[in-house]
Amino acid sequence: MRFHINGDIREADVDIRTSLLDLLREHLALPGTKKGCNQGACGACTVLVDGNRINSCLALAVQYEEREITTIEGIGTVDQLDALQAMFVEHDGFQCGYCTPGQICSAIAMAAEAQRGLPSFVTPDLAAQAIRLDHDELRERMSGNLCRCGAYNGIIDAIRATFVEEVA
């Protein structure tokens, strides 16, 4: 199978029952995406496919051949953090850091969803052209990503510092 991951073309000969998460971690040596609950409930395995967020533990790799997959390794580097990664550091948006890759991937897609005008469950005006990413809107949109350390306030502050000025 052939994949487009983080701007590179990668090939892997794996069983068609292999999850996208296992492909990334076990076959392509991309350990940044974390295996949390392995049931799609915690969001630790969130990656971007064509700019949309998905839980990679629930996806079969074969479904994503020839699609653009972005993992945390494709978002920034240790020497050059992405703006959102820098805000996570500045606002203490992580403690143990296990959920952080999924949180960052999810936040990037979440901001794009809001820019496209996709409402969430708490969006007050479904016909509004611009969605205001206030506290409740951010929490609802990020509710699929759990943090066992409880760093939610720092995570929301980091996301607000990165995206709210652009989207609001």
Image: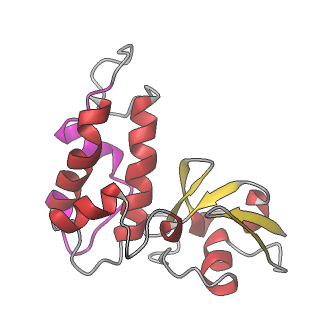
- Location of residue 122 (image quadrant): top left
Magenta segment includes 142: yes
Give coordinates of residue 113: x percent, y percent. 45, 36
Q: Which image quarter holds the N terminus?
A: bottom right
Left or right: where 91 falls relative to 66: left
Left or right: where 69 falls relative to 95: right
Give coordinates of residue 57: x percent, y percent. 58, 69
- Location of residue 67 (image quadrant): bottom right
Vertical arrangement, residue 106 with respect to residue 165, above or below: below
- Location of residue 112 (image quadrant): top left
Q: Residue at x 14, y 58 (%)?
A: 153
Q: Which image quarter holds the C terminus?
A: top left
Region in magenta: 131-153
Dominant secondary structure, magenta: loop
Give coordinates of residue 18: x percent, y percent. 73, 76
- Could you tell me if residue 60 is visible in this image? no
